[in-house]
Structures are given as structure tokens and as C-alpha cells.
Amino acid sequence: MSSHIESERLSNSLAELDQLTNWERRPRGDMRVDLEPMRDLARRLGDPQNSFRIVHVAGTKGKGSTCALIEAGLARAGFSVGRYASPHVMHITERVSIDGRPVGEERLADALGAALSAFKDARREATDGQGATWFDILTVSALLIFRSERVEWAVLETGLGGRWDSTNIVQSDVAVITNIDLEHTEILGKTRAAIAFEKAGIIKRGATVVTLLPEADEAGAVVSARAAELGCALRRPTVPADATIEQRNVALAGTVLDVLGKMGVMTKGASAMAAPLGEQLLDPSTIATARLPGRLEKIAVNITSHGDNAKVNVVLDGAHVPFNLAAVLSDLSQEEKYRAPCIAVMSIADDKDAAGLLSTMTRHDISIIFTTVGARSRSPEQLKTIADTLGLLSIVMLDPLEAYQEALAGATESGAWVLVTGSLYLVGIIRAA
């Protein structure tokens, strides 16, 4: 789905990687339950994860944005920082960034080449590394890049869960659990407490834990118990009940920076006296640099219709979990221009809770154009049937760009705004157009 890759070496490495097991494309019930393949690969490559300090982030939503904010705060403090993220919106290089910028294609090709060669050695010698997944190899490549770029800090976002996630071979200074809601229940468990247990798997002895989950919450209690068991300090930022998504993410990232400051991490750089890190690093301009594509991304699109120029407000957000979409819609409804009726362009993957996502939309004045972005998309006709039973007005347009044009045209006529949601891949296609 990503944009064109120019480097032939990167294309070849990715083609080779795609021949391997790609868990992101596998039936979701058969995930592995050990980290030995990842440990073997890392060992063969000299354990690159031990070359820098780490903040490790898990959670149902807000992981990516929280990681970007922590990265921006550390960079502002004068450190060289790497960030590992998933999935990507436009281009695979977005998954590995150095000092706030996606890594170059050739750089990623080098690292993938080294990781694939370690994988082939493991296959030849029949060691644990032969069981490595697509995501393992990409993860170890990111760690290699961070080592060779000599980053001082890496901010790692888990791909799925925590305990058995490829990133979980690391020892972190701070473990962050943003929040917990029901997602990937076929792998992570059927209750929020069970999912919290998986996410809390990233907590290591000696780390400090930062979470927004309240102590009294069933998931929060699991995180507290795990922190206590490992003798870890636990910090909970206080946020008002009506805080926006961004305010919550900033509170988490600010608390992480405070924790690092209390551990004695000082700012670097020639300009000022060194001071402990803290939330003051997240000033408005630093927060602005950390905004990610396709996460509550607001644009105004100019449309010419019948000779008149009109402006349509568009929001791109890849929300694919019901409580995430509910939070996005609630945040937007606080702004006057998003109180008008909305036309949504939407695609939902097969393994997502379509009925849950659509029922959150019934609380708002939204009509929907269902579209599709590839083999993993749920059939738009099926989505329309669910929407019909919920009383939501919808139509089907299979081509995502035609669906988007239709939404813009409809919004121009009616004064509506447009929301592109349900899938980061869909957001990527619209952004690339």
C-alpha cells in the first residue's frame, strides 16, 4: 500500500522479506509465544539493543503519537533519538526515524540486508532465529540502524500486545502503557484485564512505569500489580475527564520526561546550563513538530464547483478501534466547524470490530461512503448492511479515490465536513493522491 520505493536494493530486500512469514498478513489466531527467534537474530548481530537507552511504549491507542512526543522532547533536550513505529501510512521508511526524520531507503536496505543474512544463517544452522517473522526482521533492522547512527535514546512502540512483541527483547528505563481497550481479542485475551497482562509484559525490573490507567480500573490494577511484583515505581499523570486525545498523549509524554529528569538525565547543548529533563520541554512548537500523519490530521481542501470556489474541512484519522473513533469524534465535536453534518469515507479491515466502529457513528450526524483498500478490507456491501441495521445512511464506492471525490463534492453541496477513517492504509492512499 505504501508509496513508490525508489531504491532497487530496498525493493529487493522487501521482496525477500515478504517471502518470509508476515504476521501482519497471517490469520490472527496463530501468533507465536516466545521471543527466542528475535533473541537469536539480535545475538547474531551483536545485540544492538544494548547500545542506547530506551523508552518502551505499549497500549491500545495513542502509542504512535505518544512516542513521537517523547522523541520530540528528547530531541529538544539535545539528544540524538531513534523512534520505531508501526504501521506506516505512506512509506515503510516512516517506521524507523532518526532525529524526527524517516530513515533513508538505502540505510534501511543496508540494515535489512544484515538482518536477512543473520536470518539465513539461523536457517542454515537450524537455530531459533529460523522462526523469525517479517516484523522480527524489521525490528532488528531498526535496532541496527539506531546503533550505527549512535542514537543515545530509542523510543520503541510495540507492534501488537507487549509480552511476545518483537520489541520486547529490550531493557527499558521507562515502560509506558497508554490505555487498554478490547482489540485483537483472539490473541491478547477477551477482557481488558487479560489484555493489560499482555501489555504489562513490557515492564522490566528497574524501569519506571507510566500509565493513564487508573488504579481502580481492572486493567490499571493489573499494571499496578505487575509493577509492584518487579519493584518498579509507577507514575500516573492526572488528566481532566474531558481531556482531548492530544492532551492525554502530552500528559503521558511529559510525565516520561519528568521521570527521566528525576533519574538524573540532563539536557545537553551549548546554549543553556544543563537542567533535568521535564514536561517543560513539550512547548507548543515541540508538540506541533510531533504530530503524525493520519492521526487527527486536519486539512482544508479547495474545491471548484459550478465556477465557485469552496473550502471543505477534511480530517484524516486511521482510527480502527471503536473507543478510539469515539474519542476522535468527541474531540472534533468540541470545534464549531466539525459540528456540521459529516460525510465519512471508510474502509474497515476484516479483523476489526465493524459493528462497534459503526455504532459509535450513530451518535453523530454522519453519512458514510464505504470503500475498499485491498485484500484485508471487509466487503463494503457487508459494511453497508451493518450500517443499514444501525440506521446510518451509506453508499458503496469501491475505488477509494472516487469515494473521496464523491465525499468532497457532497460536502461542497451541503456544507458538510469530510472524515477519512477506519484504516491507516485508506488514509495513506488519500494522502498520496
Image (tube, grey):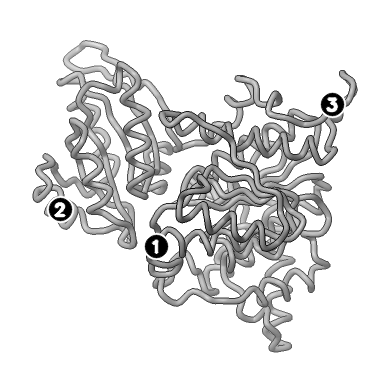
As measured in the structure, the alpha-carbon distance from the residue carrying label 3 to the one carrying label 2 is 55 Å
**Coordinates of residue 427 in the picture (x, y in percent):** 39, 41
**Coordinates of residue 268 in the picture (x, y in percent):** 86, 30
Q: Nearer the viewer, residue 88 or 14?
A: 88
**Coordinates of residue 112 in the picture (x, y in percent):** 68, 62
**Coordinates of residue 241 in the picture (x, y in percent):** 43, 31
Q: Is residue 333 above or below residue 176?
A: above
Residue under circle 3?
A: 275
Residue under circle 1?
A: 191
Q: Is residue 279 left or right of residue 328?
A: right
Q: Secondary structure at mark 3?
A: loop
Q: How many other residues sit within 10 Å of disc 2, few (<14), some (14-19) or many (≥20)?
A: some
* Residue at image coords 41%, 26%: 298
Q: Nearer the viewer, residue 233 or 332?
A: 233
Q: Nearer the viewer, residue 227 or 376?
A: 227
**Contact (Cβ within 8 Å) of mark 3 with mark 2:** no
The amino acid type of the residue labelled 3 equals: Ala
* Residue at image coords 59%, 36%: 237
Q: Nearer the viewer, residue 37 or 95?
A: 37
- Examine the rendering and report whether any part of residue 12 can be seen: no
The amino acid type of the residue labelled 1 equals: Thr
Mark 3 or mark 2, earlier in chain: 3
Mark 2 or mark 1, earlier in chain: 1
Q: Is residue 421 left or right of residue 38?
A: left
Q: Is residue 54 above or below residue 317?
A: below
Residue under circle 2?
A: 386
Q: Name the mark nearer the viewer: 2 or 1.
A: 1
Q: Is residue 60 left or right of residue 134?
A: left
Q: Is residue 258 above or below residue 82?
A: above
Q: Is residue 76 left or right of residue 285?
A: right
Q: How many other residues sit within 10 Å of disc 3, few (<14), some (14-19) or many (≥20)?
A: few
